[in-house]
Image: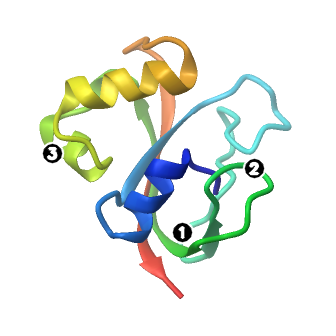
Amino acid sequence: MNFQPQLAEKVMAGEKTVTRRLASTNPRSPWSYKHCGVQIGRTYAICPGRGKPQLGRVLIVSVRRELLGWLSYREARLEGFADADAFTDAWVAINGSYDESALVWRIEFEVGT
């Protein structure tokens, strides 16, 4: 799984245990509306960007679709941010905009080996 470098570091430090990925209308996307690109019980490499060497691995423990706007204070903390505003700012920086009605994949993980 690719992350911004600073977020990949939070994953490896155990400070970020959830990520959200925008659901895509492209059926070939790993994040399509119908199919998530990761599976519960499998491990995946954590990379600080596409094509970068892995920092470690995570075990996927939960995957579900939900609305982006369902983000609570607790969820923002699981995402590695101080609060929902900090999460929203980072989301906009990464994705260009924030639409609370957007469908996302919520993926929870544990740092693994």
Q: What residue do we see at 67% from left, 49% from top?
A: 49
* 24 sits left or right of 18 in the view: right
Q: What residue do we see at 26% from left, 52% from top?
A: 78
Residue bearing mark 3: 74
Q: Are marks 1 and 2 in contact (CB under 8 Å)?
A: no
Identity of the amino acid at label 1? Ile
User: Up-down: is 105 above or below 91?
Assistant: below
Identity of the amino acid at label 2? Arg
Identity of the amino acid at label 3? Arg
Q: What residue do we see at 35% from left, 70% from top?
A: 13
* Quarter of the image where one finds residue 35: top right
Taking the view exactly as shown, the residue that stands out farthest to the bottom is 113
Q: Earlier in the sequence, mark 3 or mark 2?
A: 2
User: Up-down: is 3 above or below 22?
Assistant: below
Which numbered circle lies on residue 50?
2
Nearest the camera: 60 or 8?
Answer: 8
